[in-house]
């Protein structure tokens, strides 16, 4: 039985494989429940990822609940679905926060003296168990960092003071993405 999960997750193909495809394939194989057969990425007109698909071949239709639970454990965002034939079911519990860093309009010395990797480490430390970075996107005018966790509002509150004072976050925007 072919099942296609459409994840409301902004992940590049490599990020999708690491976060969903490989762990899900290993989990299903270890239980004789099926395998991941492929996937895809839907891009917006600007090249930013809008969603990701994971194609799963289940050995038994009775394994659909197990599949949905596994996607939830792997962090699937709200707004995700799986479909098998004519049947579509909602899945996912995590909410998403996109932090879009301005890549063109800050003072040149900010870009010269800032380290985006240090900013990411600080953001992850502030979030603790409230969320984690799942992916990123580098566009022509901004870089997006995608965090997912149980509550968008909690993540936004935990990051607000840092984002307001970190030079590389000047003129950034925070967006609910799931």
Image (tube, rainbow, N blue to C red):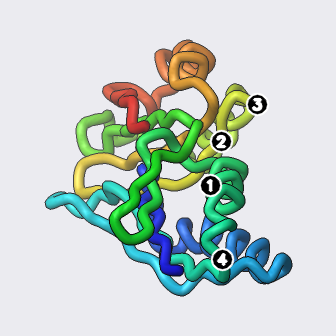
Residue 43's x, y, as percent? 26, 64
How far apart are the two marked residues, 2 and 1, measured between alpha carbons? 21 Å
- Residue drawn at (74%, 33%) of the image: 125
Which residue appears farthest toward the left when viewing the image? 45
Q: Are marks 1 and 4 in contact (CB under 8 Å)?
A: no
Number of the label disc, if any, that sits on residue 128? 3
> Which marked residue is nearer to the observer: mark 2 or mark 1?
1
Residue under label 1 = 68
Front disc: 2 or 4: 4
Which of the two marks, 1 or 3, is nearer to us in this view?
1
For label 4, the residue is 60
Q: CA distance from mark 3 to mark 2?
A: 8 Å
**Badge 2 density bin: few <14, some 14–19, many ≥20, Cα 10 Å:** many
Seen in the image, is 53 located left or right of residue 107? right
- 3D distance between C-alphas at marks 1 and 3: 26 Å
Q: Nearer the viewer, residue 14 or 178?
A: 178
Q: Earlier in the sequence, mark 1 or mark 3?
A: 1
């Amino acid at each position: 039985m072919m099942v296609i999960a459409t994840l409301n997750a902004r992940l590049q193909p490599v990020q999708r494989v690491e976060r969903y495809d490989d762990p899900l394939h290993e989990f299903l194989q270890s239980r004789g429940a099926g395998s991941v057969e492929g996937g895809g990425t839907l891009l917006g007109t600007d090249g930013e990822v809008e969603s990701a698909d994971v194609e799963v071949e289940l050995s038994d239709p009775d394994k659909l609940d197990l599949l949905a639970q596994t996607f939830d454990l792997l962090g699937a965002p709200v707004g995700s679905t799986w479909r098998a034939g004519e049947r579509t079911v909602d899945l996912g519990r995590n909410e998403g926060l996109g932090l879009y860093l301005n890549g063109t309009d800050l003072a040149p010395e900010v870009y010269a003296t800032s380290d985006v990797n240090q900013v990411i480490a600080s953001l992850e430390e502030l979030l603790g168990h409230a969320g984690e970075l799942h992916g990123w996107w580098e566009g022509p005018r901004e870089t997006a960092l995608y965090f997912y966790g149980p509550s968008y509002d909690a993540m936004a509150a935990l990051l607000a003071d840092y984002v307001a004072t970190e030079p590389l976050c000047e003129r950034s925007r925070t967006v609910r993405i799931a």
